[in-house]
């Protein structure tokens, strides 16, 4: 029995009812004719082991015979990567698996892969051609074993390329556990998954939904690369800001992870590989407490300078906002680590932030030039967007109330009705003062942002909007949007962007 026959037999042994040739063809990514041809070899092999392959028109194939003989046959066949019983070997999965083989193991011949995946040698060659074209597009070269000795910059480009390829696959299909084990190995998959589950929530200040998933994927890739013999040589061009010291929370986390990798997966680390692992974890917010670093890495000063500059541009005093200072410090540490490593992450809210909160995002971007110079980094828009979120929250916290003067000519009872109608249907940050028209001459209108009146107002030094004595829904809606506009115009930068 050929390897092709064995792949088909493994799938057939898992079935308890008839399955059509179409079913097996789709599962293995081949034609019905191929299934028909190899079913003959399967039938002969089954007969030699006291089992039978039944064929039923319009229903398909079913292996019949005693359950004991079926189980005995399963034990004889064992498990092969390409014949997991619940796996459908689509061309997309096959290429992902082959890409992993290129990075995580000694490369086999085209024929070995062809036999494992029940396809032709030419199909495997086309798969590798596509993978190599993808790598060339990313300006990555993998010349055999020499690809295992290089700098941090080269390694992170390789890992991010595979991660991108993996994410493209996951955008359309899930990977079953058997497929994940086949690609990454059972031990490394379990180590990486357990580590992220246990550690990703420890620094709530810097967590983002994307970060735990990103860390898990990159750990899967990096640990497999180290197991395969990766030997890093540090950086060539960038200046790494962090000097990692023993006795810190981060060093303990890294040491425990390294020990787990050694004892459970046979993975050992050189000093530079450990340094890379430190940056990888720190860049994803693991143990980013500022107390882990010496005073020369005082992120408090950098955070205060950034907050002051953003506040000046937005004409808002953030200097006493202790919460903003804390979250900014906790954000800067992993951000600088990521950018020192060359790691690019994505922010799903980036387009929303730049479209609807452009003033704050652009202000943060312009104000971060000192950070870039000091830490030898370049902030791209995803990082700017993530950093801007903290200032967006702070701006809402510091949002000054709109002061609205309500003028009503219709007596005390109706005037109260007008006031309550506005208070109950407009946001609570609008402070309202009610007066009669006779009090206008004694009122300093400069203290107010908007006048809402039931009667004509001659003085137009501030915006005036009119409302009925029984305010209608559409009138209140117009006032709402006017107040939003008033708030936006407080930002001087709006006029310059």
Image (spheres, grey):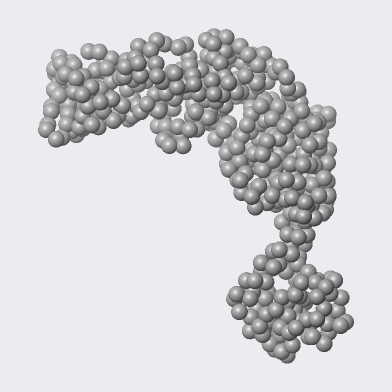
Q: Nearer the viewer, residue 121 or 425?
A: 121
Q: Quadrant of residue 173?
A: top left
Kindly give the residue lying farthest to the bottom in the view shown: 411
Q: Nearer the viewer, residue 229 or 188?
A: 229
Q: Position of residue 94 (x, y in %)?
A: 39, 24
Which image quarter is the N terminus in? top left
Relative placement, left or right, of 423 versus 3 is: right
Q: Residue at x 37, y 26 (%)?
A: 91
Q: Position of residue 246 (x, y in %)?
A: 73, 22
Q: Nearer the viewer, residue 385 or 140?
A: 140
**How many numbered callouts?**
0
- Residue 435 in sight from this viewpoint: yes
Q: Position of residue 494 (x, y in %)?
A: 75, 54
**In this view, 278 is above or below 349:** above
Q: Nearer the viewer, residue 310 or 234?
A: 310
Q: Residue at x 80, y 75 (%)?
A: 460
- Residue 220 in sight from this viewpoint: no
**In this view, 412 is above or below 352:** below
């Amino acid at each position: 029995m050929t390897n092709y026959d064995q792949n088909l037999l493994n799938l057939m042994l898992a079935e308890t009812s008839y399955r059509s040739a179409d079913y097996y063809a789709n599962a293995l990514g081949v034609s019905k004719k191929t299934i028909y041809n190899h079913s003959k070899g399967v039938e002969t092999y089954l007969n030699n082991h006291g089992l039978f392959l039944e064929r039923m028109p319009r229903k398909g194939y079913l292996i019949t015979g005693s359950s004991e003989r079926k189980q005995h046959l399963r034990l004889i066949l064992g498990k092969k990567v390409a014949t997991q019983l619940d796996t459908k070997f689509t061309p997309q999965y096959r290429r992902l698996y082959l890409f992993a083989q290129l990075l995580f193991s000694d490369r086999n011949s085209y024929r070995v892969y062809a036999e494992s995946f029940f396809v032709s040698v030419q199909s495997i060659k086309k798969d590798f051609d596509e993978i190599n074209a993808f790598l060339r597009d990313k300006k990555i070269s993998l010349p055999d074993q020499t690809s295992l000795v290089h700098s941090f910059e080269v390694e992170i480009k390789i890992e991010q390329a595979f991660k991108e390829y993996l994410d493209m696959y996951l955008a359309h299909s899930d990977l079953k556990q058997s497929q994940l084990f086949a690609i990454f190995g059972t031990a490394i998959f379990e180590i990486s998954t357990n580590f992220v589950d246990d550690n990703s929530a420890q620094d709530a200040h810097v967590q983002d939904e994307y970060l735990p998933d990103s860390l898990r994927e990159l750990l899967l890739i990096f640990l497999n690369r180290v197991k395969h013999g990766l030997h890093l040589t540090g950086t060539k061009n960038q200046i790494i800001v962090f000097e990692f010291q023993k006795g810190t929370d981060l060093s303990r986390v890294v040491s425990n992870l390294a020990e787990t990798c050694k004892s459970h997966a046979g993975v050992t680390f050189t000093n530079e590989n450990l340094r890379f692992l430190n940056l990888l974890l720190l860049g994803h917010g693991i143990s980013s407490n500022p107390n882990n670093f010496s005073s020369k890495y005082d992120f408090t000063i950098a955070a205060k300078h950034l907050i002051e500059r953003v506040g000046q541009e937005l004409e808002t005093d953030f200097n006493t906002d202790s919460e903003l200072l804390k979250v900014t410090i906790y954000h800067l540490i992993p951000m600088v680590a990521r950018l020192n490593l060359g790691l690019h992450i994505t922010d799903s809210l980036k387009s929303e932030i730049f479209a609807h909160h452009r003033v704050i995002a652009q202000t943060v971007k312009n104000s971060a030039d000192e950070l870039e110079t000091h830490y030898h980094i370049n902030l791209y828009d995803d990082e700017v967007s993530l950093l801007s979120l903290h200032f967006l929250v702070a701006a809402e916290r510091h949002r000054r109330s709109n002061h609205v003067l309500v003028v009503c000519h219709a007596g005390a009872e109706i005037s109260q009705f007008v006031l309550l109608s506005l208070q109950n249907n407009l946001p609570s940050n609008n402070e309202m003062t009610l007066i009669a028209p006779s009090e206008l001459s004694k009122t300093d209108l400069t203290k107010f942002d908007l006048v809402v009146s039931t009667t004509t107002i001659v003085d137009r030094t501030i915006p005036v909007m009119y409302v009925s004595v029984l305010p209608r829904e559409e009138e209140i809606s117009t006032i709402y949007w006017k107040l939003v506009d008033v708030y936006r115009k407080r930002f001087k930068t709006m006029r310059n962007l």
